[in-house]
Amino acid sequence: MSTVEDRKQLIKEVLDAYPEKARKKRAKHLGVYEEGKSDCGVKSNKKSLPGVMTARGCAYAGAKGVVWGPIKDMIHISHGPVGCGYYSWSGRRNYYIGTTGVDTFGTMQFTSDFQERDIVFGGDKKLKVIIDELDELFPLNNGFTINSECPIGLIGDDIEAVARQKSKDIGKTVVPVRCEGFRGVSQSLGHHIANDTIRDWVFKPEDEKESTFDSTPYDVAIIGDYNIGGDAWSSRILLEEIGLRVVAQWSGDGTLEEMKLTPNVKLNLIHCYRSMNYISRYMEEKYGIPWLEYNFFGPTKIAESLRAIAAKFDETIQQKAEEVIAKYEPTAKAILDKYTPRLQGKKVMMMVGGLRPRHVVPAFKDLGMEIVATGYEFAHGDDYKRTTDYVKDSTVIYDDVTGYEFEKFAETLEPDLVAAGIKEKYVFQKMGLPFRQMHSWDYSGPYHGYDGFAIFARDMDLALNSPTWDLIKTPWKK
Amino acid sequence: MAQDPNNIKDHVELFHQPEYQELFERKQQCEGMAPAEEVSKFAEWTKTWEYREKNFDRKHSVINPAKACQPLGAILAAVGFEETLPFVQGSQGCVAYFRTHFSRHFKEPFNAASSSMTEDAAVFGGMKNLIDGLANSYTLYKPKMIAVSTTCMAEVIGDDLSAFIGNAKNEGAIPEDFPVPFAHTPSFVGSHITGYDNMMKGILSYLTKDQKKESTNGKINFIPGFETYSGNLREMKHLVNAMGVDATILADNEHNLDSANTGEYKMYHGGTPLAAAADSINAEATFALQTYTTSKTRQYIEKEWGQKTAAFRPWGIKATDEFLMALSEATGNPIPAELELERGRAVDAMTDSQAWVHGKKAAIYGDPDLVMGMLQFMLELGIEPVHVLVTNSTKEFEAEAKALLEASPYGQQATVWGGKDLWHLRSLLFTEPVDFLIGNSYGKYLWRDTGTPLIRIGYPLFDRHHLHRYSTIGYNGAINLLNWIVNSVLDELDRNTIVPSKTDISYDLIR
């Protein structure tokens, strides 16, 4: 069972379970990649069907949870009822250095804890008081974001007016983020909304660039790395080793000042294209800063990316890039020598957010592993186009896969490892399938860069080759 | 340093290597953060009484609250019923969060569907989403029941669940006789425990409609409450079985939230049969094992079913005694020797350990019932609660907690802080330190900041494995609680006496 036709048949069978209306819609999101085509042939960024158990989250999750949340020196207020902030509290492992509660606030949960009277009378007045109170209790904060939850947009509060007034009152940046959960079809719109608020409320059009900044020709920013398990650091170290100066990290371990300085850099380096291409394009238009996508998963792509990045600079950088690649090559080879024999030929099914379903493929390939199926929670058409560079003929592609589909595909494709999120983890483990969380790195990491790849290889091995899987079968049952 | 294939360093060690420490220093240059001296100055300030007063002056900001919102509780109630799929009317992010939260705590799959409402539903209402959603859930996941709760979005726009579900049936999206109980669970009222109560009441009132018979079925109903210890479901069944009670559990989510790994995934495990739940209206009585998570349901049962209800909280020895005596009275069955033996063992364990915990000062936070249960047990051991904090508090809880504390010589130092959050608790722990803190995983930040050792009892438990598989109720639960408390105290004692030739005089082998 490996040909394109067989897998198309599998999709058809899986779709049979749906009511007709839903089947027609879901059919457009499932496909089989055919070698040579420039697209995966699936529709994306459409509304999830009600009741099918999508893995997707909401705009708030994309804006507060992903983009803004990791900016460590700002206080991110979850504006509305208590739940959203509670569930997203410390959930994403965006590592940072700082004294939490004093100069950094990443693992804290600030909420306006809406009650019925706030729904009836509005929350603007309350919000003003909250900003004053928090500014007094946390004087070293460098600013605020106000992240709207569903009710805010429905009751007609004017958080922009509050933001303008409070910014003037306290002399700090206050950013209103209209990321109500019902906006858009997934986290993805939340990323876009958050990007736009950086453009409108952090970059000041009238100032252009910060003129006092002491630039060098080698200034870059890391864009779209949320420093999960320290990913941005194990990436940054390589960029610094090849002679570049990293001015800003967006947004893992990042600060407001770093964001403000970014219009001074020479090149923006984008890891998560899905969540931060918007602001990169804006900086290109506004400040003429080019941007480059790179991939730091697995030694093949790391070397390729380092060379591509270096090619944007002078020969000294290019020379250093070669030295850095040469320096890490023996270790990378030792890691591959150790783990490839243990992982060779193993089949993987993936389902992650908007980048990793393609970006992690080469790291698996480096270890001799094969991707039999992959798909995104919230990708757009451009992501699926980019995916064609990563997958091979007959790979099953699913967009916004439902709980039912994922389970059925796994039953037939019989992967050796499933790599997705926490909501899927225990489903597949109950099926006896080794599993790794690909959002949180299953509490491990970093996985980016050469240092990260060693950990990635170790973790895939420990998941796949754990002796616990052999215990599942009861010996007296045939 | 490059990685050594035989000793791969992950985040725990990697970032302490010199090259990363240098990287962090370089990074500071562009961060625009306050200098270290200023940070220490302000960090010290947050430990003062002055800061505490400012902190307690807060009118509207809530920082690190120990409560979630209603639909979380609603879906926990729903998964206790046989092959029931929880379904939440609103935007889909909520359900993604709930499922994530429960999966991180139970380390189990948690199934729930959303009606995935978006902008158009905000304008036109969520009826279409509900109808399509019910059809899809019903067809794909083949549940025996779908239990619908709501989010703040559906509540703000005023979705009429009763009418929508009726329309779904009229349109043939789901069969006419397919059970779809519902509850309104707005996130801006109460907390997760309110949602549990509302959904339980919703399901019971739906299933028991027209089921009232002339005579009773001779059974007793048991409502566990917002119970996040699967061990407590087991312990409850054990006590009830040992007492020879013919019981209906409303509802039994033990197997759904603690299923065996057989290599085959099944979506539904066990649960209270719908027929048994429907017949619960004919029981002799309904006993709840939590008070504040079941008040509306009990009120409803008394009023609408004409059934006697009572709430127990069998945490610690005396409360378990009371629970068993009540069961004995209700059934006429004696308390068996088996349970007397368990009682004796638990008391024996407590007398063995009491010296290490007597007079220890404690802080505790959590849901009202859990805090009450722990207070009962701590006072029995001679532990002295000092800070008692409940974010989702009620006047009734505060009165009950105060009465319990005032009646005990060990409760005299305690203050009950209702409606406060964990940032308030941080100030309390700095200004009036205690020996240990009891709370959920979020308490680890208080442990780090204030140095107060954390004993993890509560919900959620994200950073320790399997604690939720144990019981906290009954005599067996008392031993578990004691084990966690006394051994945490002893671990801390070792930690404080471990420096060779400095503190290790007291690093005793035998304790």
Image: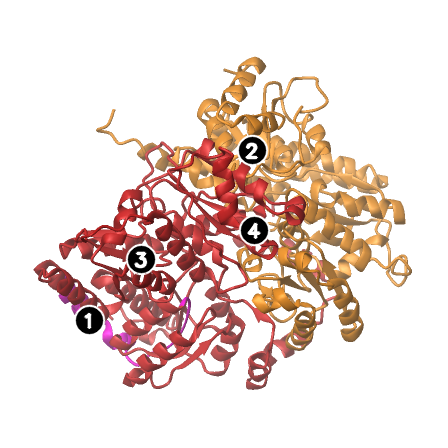
Q: Chain of mark 2?
A: A
Chain letter, orange: A
Mark 4–mark 3 Cα distance, whole angstroms, equals: 30 Å
Chain letter, red: B
Numbered disc 1: secondary structure: helix
Q: Which residue is mark 1?
A: B352
Residue located 67% across and 24% down the image: A41
Residue located 62% across and 18% down the image: A393
Q: Amino acid at mark 3?
A: Pro
Mark 1–mark 2 Cα distance, whole angstroms, equals: 55 Å
From the viewer's perspective, is residue B357 above or below residue A267? below
Mark 2–mark 3 Cα distance, whole angstroms, equals: 35 Å
Which contiguous range is marked in magenta? B342-367
Q: Earlier in the sequence, mark 4 or mark 3?
A: 4
Q: State left or right for residue B171 relative to residue B35.
A: left
Q: Which residue is mark 2?
A: A401
